[in-house]
Amino acid sequence: MLAVLTLLTALVRPEATPPPSPLSLGEKLLARQQYAAAERELQRAVEIDPSSARAHGNLALALLFQKKIRESVDEGRLAAAFAPESAEARFIYGLTLSATGKPIDAAREYEKAVALRPDSARPVAALAEAYAALEDARAVETYEKAIQLAPSDPRLRADLAEYLWGTGHNDEGNAVMERALLAFPSDADLAVRYGRSLAEQDRLADAARSLEKARQLGANDAGTFALLARVDAQQGRMDEARATLEAGVAAHPNDASLQHDLGRTWLSEGKAEQALPYLERAAAAKPNHAEYQLDLGRALESVGRLDDAEAAYRKATSLAPNSLGAHFALGRLLQREGKKEEAEGQLARHHELYEQAAQRTAGTNVQASELARAWVELEHGKAAEALVRFRSFPDSAESLRGQALAYQRLGRHAEAVQALERAHALAPDDAHLQMLLVAERSRAPSAP
């Protein structure tokens, strides 16, 4: 009897579950966004089966999400080589090529993926994005096809509008976005993106309405606060601008740009005491930002703290030796303090910089045909060529604005911000440049 029971127990005992394969485990980790752990398992899967397109493709994604771009391209290439008729392998290889800034090569792989799976929205959308990066006219019809395949994805409609705006077709882009907002009336991102474009088109009242709607729908990022405030300020709605900035500072107390904008708004109204705490916090958060030091100095001078103002002005001239405003402010303060000789030196430096700026403007006028050629290149979808040409000119507000727009077309938003900041330093009173700068910062919130 004991022998029979032992036999029955053995028969009904559940078999041990085999451990998952490295490929299966790697895919699960990838789905959980545990990319480093997924990479380790998928490397093992590749070692077990070096010709597995699935293993190479998933490894390419794990590497790509860790910004290991070169390695991800190598794995993506292997995935496509081992499974040339796999739409997924071609799509993954295209993703890695896009990450390297090679939209022509990426488009080639996406085209193959679309040919293999014409009913799949992901490769069609990726192909549209690659065409847009190339400013290829096929981007429009490809975006429209992607929208048909994924009608519930508002991002595709917004991306189409952005492409049309970026290529100078504002009316068409506006029409696409207005239809998108009708289809997705509660989408805050659509309202933000439309508001930003309207601001860049100088349709300030419409931009304000769109951005206010975005705020009501829950848009709470620092860039939206800053952009709405700038739009209000340029319409002379200073109370509304200040209220928006106060809400922005409350929501983002560590954002130096919002602190600076609010302080500068108070300062522009002649209320230096109210401005000072915000300007102090902004300058403390970004001590190497010359504009913040300059505005802090102005507030300190206005409240009678002349020694502190002088220190701030000196720091601004040190950080930005070619800043007309910093040398002028320091020279005037030194005059006020009776430091005549040093004041004359600072004001002479201001005059010298002013004359240099005038010469640059004259030089730009002499080279007007070349500058116009750069703008034509930009308008005809040759952003990379236009960028090279704009960068060949001496820095001027116009050439730097051209650089910024070329960087924007190429998706290099942090560099666009830097170019616009340099343009703003050369033309601090240019309201349109200020608007472009704030709008571009809202696209690249991590930019300095």
Image (cartoon, rainbow, N blue to C red):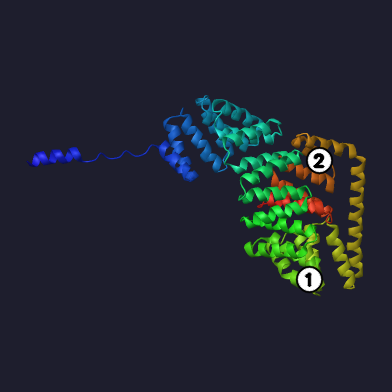
Which quadrant is the C terminus positioned in? Answer: bottom right
Q: What residue sits right under mark 1 in the picture?
A: 272
Q: Which percent across, then down, holds residue 266? A: 77, 67
Residue linked to disc 2: 390
State whether residue 448 appears in this view: no
**For the residue marked with disc 1, what is the amino acid?**
Ala
* Residue in front for this viewpoint, 208 or 421: 208
Q: Which amino acid type is marked by label 2? A: Phe
x and y, in percent, of residue 330 in the image: 85, 65
Disc 1, SS = helix
Out of 31 and 248, give the one closest to the viewer. Answer: 248
Tell me residue 444's x, y (percent). 67, 49
Which label sits in the foreground, 2 or 1? 1
- From this view, report whether residue 298 is shown above or below residue 84: below
Query: Is residue 301 toward the left or the right of residue 150 in the image?
Result: right
- Residue 404 at what x, y percent from top left? 76, 45
Rendered view: 103 above or below 267: above
- Disc nearer the start of the sequence (2/1): 1
Tell me the distance, in whole angstroms, between the alpha carbons under discs 2 and 1: 39 Å
